[in-house]
Image (cartoon, grey):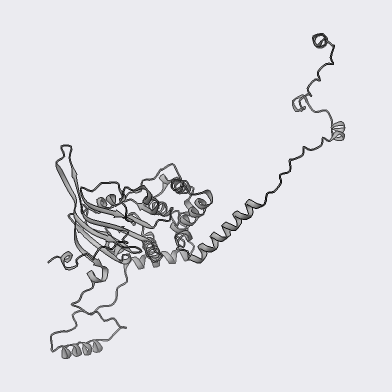
Amino acid sequence: MTQAAANPPATIRTDSVVVCQHLTKVFKDFWMRDLARAVNDLSFEIRPREVFGLLGPNGSGKSTTIKVILGLLRPTQGRVAVFGKAPSDVSIKKRIGYLPEESYLYGFLNARETLDYYAKLFEQDYKTRRRRIDELLDMVGLTGAQYRPVREYSKGMQRRIGIAQALINDPDFLILDEPTTGLDPIGTRQVKDLIIALGKRGKTILLSSHLLADVEDCVDRLVILYGGQVRAEGTCDGLLVSQSKTTIEADTLDEATIAEVDRVIRVRSGGERAITKVSKPRQSLEQLFLDIVAKARAENLTTSGATAGGETASFLTSRGEGDALIESLVATEAAASGSMVETPVTPAKAPAPDVLASLVAPEAPPALRPAAPTTPSPPKGVDASVIEGLLDGGEKRS
C-alpha cells in the first residue's frame, strides 16, 4: 500500500481557494499523437489561509499544474477551480500573485521602474505605488540598489525583485515556483520567514520547490508527485514523524549516567529495547552561516550585494475592521465637506511697471533690450504709405 492510499484526500470543501479534481494534461505532437502525459488524474485542494507544498522530482508535473491553475494551459480532462471560478476568468487575476521559476524581467529598467510597471498593470494610483514600492524594496533588501538596471543584478537579486513584483498587488493567493533558486542562505532564510509571516496574516500560498528542507520549514500541508500522480499527501508531522523511535535530549551526560539509563531501559522493556545511539546535537550549516554573516555585519563590513531585508511591507498585513471603518468615515466626511465648500478663485494681478527704475537704469545693449512697443495706428485721414516712405528714406540716408 502506497502512502497516498494510506492518506486519502479529505472531502473537498466549498470554500477552497483551489480545487483540482481528476486533472489530466496530455501534450501532443504535430500529428495530435500523445507526446507526454504530464499530469495524470490529479486531485487535491488548497484551503484558505494555508501554505500548501507541491513537491516532486523534475518532470513530475508541478509546473504544468501551476500553469493550469493560472489559466495558461487548458486541462485535457478534469476540473480546476480558483476562488470558485474557472482559471481563465479575468476577474480573479487581480487576486493572484505569481513568481515563475525563471525571472522574466526587463533588463533596461531598474528595480523601482520594474515595480512601478507591474503596479500600473493593476491600475494603482501614484501614492499607492510609491508607498508599496518603498516598502517592498526595503523588505527584499534592494533599497541600496534600486536605481541599478536589472540586467546588472545577480541571479539572487533578480529573484528578490521577482518576489517583490509578485506581492505588489497584495494578492490573496500567492504562487511561488522555486522562490529560493539562486538565493544565498541569508536570502533563503528571509524568504522562508516571509512565507511563514504571510501565512500567519491570512494569505494562501502555493509553494513549489526542489529544496525539501525549505518546504519542510514553511508548509502546513503538502503533496508529493511522481509521474503526474499523487504519491503522498498530508501534514509534515503526519508524513515525517517516526513512530518506531524515541529521541531524548538532555544536558551533557557522563558515561556512567548513560550506562545507568541504558540499564533501566533494558529492565523496563524486558531486554527488548536499549539505547542504540548516543551523540551530541549538531548545529545546522545554515545556522552557522547566518551566525558568521551576523558577526561580519556587526563589524560594519561593506558589501555591494543585496542587504538584509527589512520588515514585512505594511500593506501586506491584514487590517482590522475598526481601522477600515474609521478610514471610510474620514473619507466620506472629507468628500462631503469638499462638495459643500467652494473656495473663490481670485485672478492674479499683473505687477505694476517700475517707471522710475526704467528711467534711471542705463541703456541696455541691443541684444538685451526689450522688444520695441507696437507702433500706434495713424489717425484717420492720414495716408499710412506716405509715412512709411518717409521713414524708409530716413533710414537709407542714415
The residue located at (36%, 47%) in the rendering is 90
Task: Where is residue 128? Give x, y as percent.
Answer: 51, 52
Q: Is residue 212 left or right of residue 31?
A: right
The residue located at (60%, 58%) in the rendering is 333
Q: Quadrant of residue 246?
A: bottom left
User: Is 254 or 327 nearer to us in this picture?
Assistant: 327
Q: Quadrant of residue 171?
A: bottom left
Task: Where is residue 212? Give x, y as percent.
Answer: 27, 62
Is residue 259 shown to the viewer in this render? Answer: yes
User: Is 190 or 275 nearer to us in this picture?
Assistant: 190
Task: Where is residue 150? Give x, y as percent.
Answer: 42, 46
Task: Where is residue 315? Give x, y as percent.
Answer: 47, 59
User: Is 44 or 338 nearer to us in this picture?
Assistant: 338
How many badges with numbers are in the image?
0
The residue located at (84%, 30%) in the rendering is 362
Q: Which quadrant holds the N terminus?
A: bottom left
User: Is 142 or 61 nearer to us in this picture?
Assistant: 61
